[in-house]
Amino acid sequence: MPKLPDAVHIIEVGPRDGLQNEPEHIATDTKLAFIRALQAAGLPTIEATSFVHPKAIPQLADSGAVATQLDHSAACEWMALVPNDKGLQRAIDAGLKRIAVFTAASDAFTEKNIRMSVAQSLETFAGVVEQARSAHMTVRGYVSTAFVCPYAGEIDTAKVVDVSKALWAMGCDEIAISDTIGAAAPTDIHRVVEAVAQALPIDRIALHLHDTYGTALANIYAGLEIGVTRFDASAGGLGGCPYAKGASGNVATEDLVYLFDRMGIQTGVDLGKLFAASNLIAKALNRDLPSKQWQRLHAASIA
Amino acid sequence: MPKLPDAVHIIEVGPRDGLQNEPEHIATDTKLAFIRALQAAGLPTIEATSFVHPKAIPQLADSGAVATQLDHSAACEWMALVPNDKGLQRAIDAGLKRIAVFTAASDAFTEKNIRMSVAQSLETFAGVVEQARSAHMTVRGYVSTAFVCPYAGEIDTAKVVDVSKALWAMGCDEIAISDTIGAAAPTDIHRVVEAVAQALPIDRIALHLHDTYGTALANIYAGLEIGVTRFDASAGGLGGCPYAKGASGNVATEDLVYLFDRMGIQTGVDLGKLFAASNLIAKALNRDLPSKQWQRLHAASIA
């Protein structure tokens, strides 16, 4: 029996990564109710929105209104994606204390996504991170397409390590190794995470997994074996990446919580309350959610 | 990086476990076309049907017609479920060389399912297995509800070991440790399979997993780590257990093949041909299938 961590930290990305690609307009109040329900379920960190340009992601055009109305005195840690100096200023104005910056291990991907090479993105973010830290904020760095890029194919492990180190060196305190198109298998997790863990502390590496091929929980289990304790997930399995063809939703928070609960690993999350939060957004979207656990609880609730 | 097997053996149970609970009548010719397409995809073992009483499972009332028309000279290994002496005779008459018998690690489950205690079922099967072996057949033994029983809850590991040993002792050459309601997590797999492997060879232990909570691929990965090389799956993720409330389909063969392919583990199965086989049955059922990989390939095929 492999030795697994006693407790994990789930980073809820549903309000940002989960909703950003939804074509249906969602009212700011609905988003806030969703976020507050997630907070009530015990999620310790919630990525609440993104300060990208409203034209790029119209769904999150109300990021300022959402972030301003969060309870900034709560124990819950709020986070928002920030693409540049302007986005950072909006995050600061909204009272946020934690931001995330977003690059990738594939130039083909960053060119399509943020119209910069990886190196250019790192230059841009170095300034953003420096300013954020001067403003007493903390910063997460995303390394997207850390396994397979939808445009460039297989990604060199060394490139993931280099980008992770660069983000760490500029002051990020957490690196989210991201399987943007959900193509990884547990052997990929071992290969890449073990390499990154040579360069930075294992407890500051997060896994951000999509579940396109159904491998996400297997990959999370592989992560646990290596000692990873930080995992991203979205309520109900909301999501999908607008820039990555074939990318389905994030792994579902409910499914993670079931897995961890069953293995006796503490999450601090109440599954029933989490289901209530997901239901709130399922009703707003007027559709079922992909999470297996959500579907089970939903079937039981209407039986 | 854990040491994993180089190759695995997938037991396709779609035509039996996958279809048995489908309310829609499926024509014998459609079943045979499905089975032959699975064979063409390279699946080495196919559980083709079940010789239970037609009243118990009307969908498989044509088991004799299906089994008789299989190509018994093919390299593909055919298997059928047999509940008693009468079923065995029908399997022999149909030209089958391999059968499966079905019990559980929970008396509450066998009482509901086959109206016998586990001990009574083992007595019944001892006679069936003896006759089958006299007729030069080989026999698989299923140990259902090996982790959690929908009626009795958590299952004692020792009970799984005892039932596995009893089936082995009576002449079964393979024991299928079954997560009937799909509740297990990787730690359960380690606990139970490691205990069973103390009593019988690891290469004769199969994992039969349902994917109710999305944990099946994680559990398969845990099985690989222990050295398990035999895994049940159903094309497209067909299935569900008529006796187990809340049990969703078997883990999907496509999703298994993706996982194994990605990890460089040989299966002998062609994913494209497997998708064609699943499509055949999806059309007959006139609905989408739960497999993530099937959904992806299906979306691509209609794009």
Image (cartoon, coloured by chain):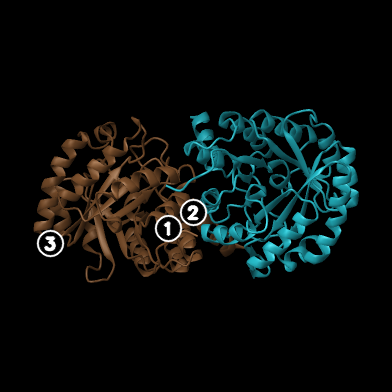
Chain colours: A brown, B cyan
Residue A298 or residue B72, whichever sits in front? B72
**Circle 1: element type:** helix
Q: Position of residue A296 (x, y in %)?
A: 56, 59
- Residue at image x 72%, y 53%? B142
**Circle 2: element type:** loop
The alpha-carbon separation of the residues under discs 3 and 2 comes to: 37 Å
Which mark, residue A136? 3
Name the amino acid type tagged 3: His
Instruction: Tell me, yes or no, whether the two marked residues, 3 and 2, touch with CB atoms within 8 Å.
Output: no
The alpha-carbon separation of the residues under discs 1 and 2 comes to: 8 Å
In primary-sequence order, the first of circles 3 and 2 is: 3
For label 2, the residue is A291
Name the amino acid type tagged 2: Ser
Residues at discs 3 and 2 both on one chain: yes
Instruction: Tell me, yes or no, whether the two marked residues, 1 and 3, touch with CB atoms within 8 Å.
Output: no
Graded by Cα atoms within 10 Å as few (under 14), some (14 to 19) or many (20 or more), the crowding at tag 1 reads many
Q: Position of residue A206 (x, y in %)?
A: 32, 54
For label 1, the residue is A253
Name the amino acid type tagged 1: Thr
